[in-house]
Image (tube, coloured by chain):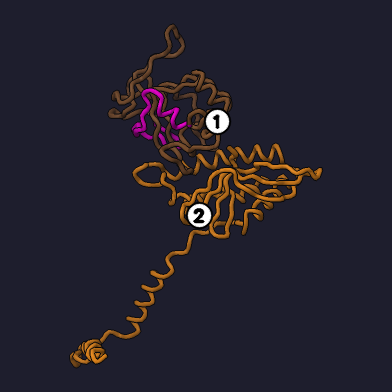
Chain colours: A orange, B brown
Amino acid sequence: MARLDRLRDQLTAPVRTRRRGSPRRPAGVVSFALLLVLAFAGCGAPPPPLANTHPSPEALAAAVLDALADNDRDRLAALALDGREFRDVVWPELPASRPERGVPVSYAWADLRQKSSNALRRLVAQWGGRRFTLLGVAWDGETTDYGPYLVHRETRLRLLDETGREVEMHLYGSTLVRGEEHKVFSYVVD
Amino acid sequence: MLLREGTSATIRNFIVLGFKEASIDIDHTATFDQVENGSLTLASGIIHGNCLVSGCDAQFRTDSDDEAAFKTTRQIVTDSANVSFVDPALADPYDLSSPDYRPAATSPALNGTVTAAMPPMNDTFIETADFIGAVGPSGGGKDTWWQGWTDFATN
């Protein structure tokens, strides 16, 4: 216990030995720098935003069904990833984004967007204007954990059709989940 | 590259590159049956740089069709003759508006790493090629056949 007194003396010694007249660092500067360091170390940059998300797989599926019943392709498209979200949220976590792979994000996004858009066009042509009631959501394919987000593949919806008959359908393909944010990753149904 | 239900094909001198999903995916029992009876075969090809946005294991993704079949897609491809998983070193295959699919001079599509297959006997339609892939090396006479009638506009 007695050693603590010595320790206290050692800790305070530099202050005591500061030469008279030597400049002293303003305490405010030290505090501000410390706060700045703690702020960066503790919080980091906020995750890139995802627009138009839904809080659960069921809420996302219901939004897809509503837009489909309204034949609203733009609304359906807005429920899926856009180019900025793919670039900022998805791409950095994919193995294909490693520099040695030499694949530009523009190529990967163009491929994904074109196939998803084509699948969306077919979805609206086949089922647009039809109203379904959601009973449940499941995934037949695998789930991949990319760290900040998950991708569930082969989304299967359990539905009631307009006649009250229970049906199971794959109306869209994969679902991206980040925390409580849900979006359609791709409308492509394998 | 999805080989859909019942596909029957002789696939040779191919490069499978830059697919969003697995490099090759054989779908449905009927397609696996074609493999088993010899009506769907692959040889002399290069597979590289696929699975851009999906989780894969060495260019393949085993699914329920694979598990139900006599072999997985991966086993079928790796058992095929003369198939390599090296970078084909194409000039600029990922340029969306102006891609350049010509193999570089040192490309394994040219240098014998993968030997090009010959067309079937008495076949007068398919030309013999000494490279792997659809486009030949610069100046080789088979590097510009696609120009003038293909369109790479994004939609």
Give the residue type that dot 2 points to: Tyr
Furthest residue to the top?
B122
Residue type of the residue flagged with mark 1: Asp
Kindly identify which residue carries mark 1. B27
Q: Residues within 10 Å of mark 2 (few under 14, many from 20)?
A: some
Task: Say which of marks 1 and 2 sits in front.
Answer: 1
Residue B85: x percent and y percent?
A: 36, 32
Horizontal and vertical percent position of residue B9: 50, 20
Is residue A50 covered in magenta? no
Q: Which residues are magenta?
A: B72-100
Determine the residue located farthest toward the right in the rendered image. Answer: A163
Residue A166 appearing in the image: yes
Which chain does the residue under circle 1 lie in? B
Q: Position of residue A22 (x, y in %)?
A: 20, 88
Q: Nearer the viewer, residue B2 or A35?
A: B2
**Left of A69 or right of it: where is A140?**
left
- Front position in the image: A33 or B46: B46
- Point out the image quarter for the C terminus of chain A: top right
| Mark-to-mark CA distance, 1 and 2 | 28 Å
Q: Which residue is mark 2?
A: A149
- Closest to the observer: B13 or B146? B13
Which chain does the numbered disc 2 sit on?
A
* A167 relative position to B73: left or right: right
Instruction: Answer above or below: position of A87 versus B49.
Output: below
Question: Which residue is nearer to you in this view: B105 or B100?
Answer: B105
